[in-house]
Image (cartoon, coloured by chain):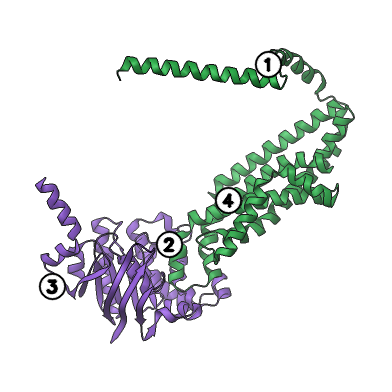
């Protein structure tokens, strides 16, 4: 096949693909009664609405202390859920890792827990737990805890396998006990990476805590929900603004910490 | 006195390939033995069977009068304190200091809690500095290991194995990732210190010339069986041809084609 024939074949392939994509988009919007043109046309209106309604007015600033109090509650809950999950994840991570795992049964058990906890979204966990624990901060805490447990266990298993295989072998050869190996080789070697994952988890949890709070009626999510449902859009804007600022601050802080420890 | 006795050792990782087949040899106390052979000949596996880092499938390994294969966990740990091990990639904890890594060699003598909380005696610390002095890296004692060169890291590895006060040191390709200059330094230290302290040494090596110039005895391994076992001066080119057979046959083929 010469160059010219290949080029024309490429051209036809592109045309066919574009045609397929257009057909599918048309069919999909037809079935769901979604009008693209209409959607784009309403965009300017939506933006105007956002700018005219979602503004922070001086009166709403009076609510700031109350909102900050709720924000602090959310942040503290996220940190608590992350730190407690860290402790359990550490043990599950040691059990699930190929380097430090003691038995295959425990390894499978750890990885099973991790994947169940991780593959159900935090929002789904919140809704499931809502049924048995009701609308309180315990439910929010547990939802975040379970989500963090799954994610951190997975991250720790990989960190341990990656970072400490050779040192573990060496300490095994000196006749060290299991916990000596864990505390003298695995932890020193994996700690910076683990802290980095924990910080990432805290960031993620503060973001999810807002959403979980809407469902469980706690923390900053509750304020958001309350103002939203009472049509106090100026206060909603303030809440959103405070959340964005705090997430950015926490992200900057953890980036700073990461730079120092890694 | 015989320190290590390997009898009819066999090992296979899966049903198809047998890594070791009927390997038998003895190592005297204080002897310096090199094992040479191609990559995949089973050198590393053989070495790891001696301190049971890999399980023994067939035959026996007798170390200092005890059958290594029959030991329980506790006894195995106790036995391993008598066997030092040196690795190709040094296997240190890179984020810890040199002195901490050297003291890891003492963990086998400690209870779990003593080890976890760093309860090392003054005597052990002095011993660690003595060894670092001897290996010429005492200046780096408080540096992190990942700041040292390959040759220096391997000397930390040697110090860690010697602080165990072992009867035997197993070296798995100790110089395979070092330049010729550092290789010579490492082999010199290994030879002189083990001689001085009367420690037996089993070294896996790629380089025949180095094996010949340093060791008392050479064991040639090919496809999991011993094809040569004798003093280094008896190793002729016919033997090395057999040990590295596949390689030479291939080269010849290339030449004739």
- Image quadrant assignment for residue A235: top right
Q: Label 1: which residue? A: A36
Are dots 1 and 2 on a single chain? no
Are dots 3 and 1 on a single chain? no
Q: Depth-wise, is mark 1 or mark 4 nearer the camera? A: 1
In the picture, one chain is green; tell me its letter.
Answer: A
Q: Where is residue B106 in the image (x, y as percent from the top left)?
A: 46, 74
The image's mark for residue B148 is: none
Relative depth, front residue between A49 and A199: A49
Horizontal relation, residue A146 to residue B75: left or right: right
Are dots 3 and 2 on a single chain? yes
Q: Distance between the residues labelled 1 and 4?
A: 41 Å
Q: Distance between the residues labelled 3 and 2?
A: 35 Å
Q: Depth-wise, is mark 1 or mark 2 nearer the camera? A: 1
Q: What element carries label 2?
A: loop
Q: Is residue A201 above or below residue B208?
A: above
Q: Depth-wise, is mark 3 or mark 1 nearer the camera? A: 1
Q: Distance between the residues labelled 3 and 1?
A: 87 Å
The image's mark for residue A155 is: 4
Q: Position of residue B50 (x, y in %)?
A: 36, 74
Task: Give the mark nearer the N terminus: 1 vs 4.
Answer: 1
Q: Label 2: which residue? A: B92
Horizontal relation, residue A13 to residue A38: left or right: left
Evaluate whether residue B135 shows in this view. no
Q: What element carries label 3?
A: helix
Evaluate whether residue B187 shows in this view. yes
Q: Depth-wise, is mark 4 or mark 2 nearer the camera? A: 4
In the picture, one chain is purple; tell me its letter.
Answer: B
Chain letter of mark 3 equals: B
The image's mark for residue B233 is: 3
Chain letter of mark 1 equals: A
Chain letter of mark 2 equals: B
């Amino acid at each position: 096949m010469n160059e010219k024939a290949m080029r024309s074949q490429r051209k036809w392939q592109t045309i066919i693909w574009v045609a397929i994509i257009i057909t599918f988009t048309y069919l999909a919007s037809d079935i769901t009664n979604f009008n693209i043109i209409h959607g784009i046309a309403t965009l300017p209106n939506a933006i105007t609405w956002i700018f005219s309604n979602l503004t922070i007015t001086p009166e709403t600033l009076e609510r700031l202390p109350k909102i900050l109090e709720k924000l602090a509650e959310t942040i503290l809950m996220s940190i608590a859920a992350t730190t407690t999950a860290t402790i359990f994840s550490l043990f599950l991570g040691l059990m699930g890792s190929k380097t430090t795992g003691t038995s295959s049964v425990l390894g499978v058990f750890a990885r099973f827990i991790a994947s169940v906890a991780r593959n159900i979204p935090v929002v789904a966990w919140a809704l499931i737990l809502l049924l048995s624990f009701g609308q309180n901060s315990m439910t929010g805490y547990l939802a975040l805890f379970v989500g963090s447990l799954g994610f951190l266990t997975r991250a720790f298993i990989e960190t341990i396998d990656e970072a400490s295989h050779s040192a573990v072998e060496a300490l095994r050869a000196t006749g060290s006990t299991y916990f000596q190996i864990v505390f003298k080789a695995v932890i020193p070697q994996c700690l910076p990476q683990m802290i980095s994952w924990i910080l990432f988890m805290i960031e993620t949890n503060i973001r999810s805590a807002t959403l979980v709070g809407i469902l469980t009626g706690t923390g900053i999510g509750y304020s958001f929900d309350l103002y939203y449902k009472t049509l106090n859009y100026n206060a909603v804007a303030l809440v959103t603004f405070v959340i964005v600022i705090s997430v950015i601050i926490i992200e900057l802080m953890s980036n700073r910490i990461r730079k120092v420890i890694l | 006195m015989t320190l290590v006795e390997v009898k009819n050792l066999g090992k296979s990782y899966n049903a198809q390939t047998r890594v070791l087949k009927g390997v038998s040899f003895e190592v005297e106390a204080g002897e310096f033995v090199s094992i040479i052979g191609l990559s995949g000949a089973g050198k590393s596996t053989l070495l790891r069977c001696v301190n049971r880092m890999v399980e023994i499938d067939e035959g026996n390994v007798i170390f200092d009068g005890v059958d290594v294969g029959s030991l329980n966990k506790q006894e195995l740990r106790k036995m391993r304190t008598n066997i030092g091990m040196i690795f190709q990639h040094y296997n240190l904890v890179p984020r810890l200091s040199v002195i901490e890594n050297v003291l890891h060699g003492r963990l086998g003598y400690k209870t779990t809690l003593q080890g976890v909380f760093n309860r090392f005696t003054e005597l052990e610390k002095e011993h660690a500095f003595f060894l670092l002095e001897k290996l010429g890296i005492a200046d780096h004692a408080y540096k992190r290991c990942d700041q040292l060169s390959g040759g220096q890291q391997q000397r930390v590895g040697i110090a860690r194995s010697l602080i165990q006060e072992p009867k035997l040191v197993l070296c798995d390709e100790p110089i395979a990732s070092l330049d010729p200059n550092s290789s010579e330094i490492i082999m010199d230290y290994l030879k002189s210190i083990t001689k001085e302290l009367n420690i037996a040494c089993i070294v896996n090596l790629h380089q025949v010339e180095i094996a010949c110039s340093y060791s008392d005895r050479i064991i040639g391994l090919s496809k999991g069986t011993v094809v040569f076992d004798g003093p280094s001066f008896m190793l002729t080119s016919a033997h090395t041809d057999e040990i590295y057979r596949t390689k030479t046959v291939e080269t010849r083929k290339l030449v004739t084609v």
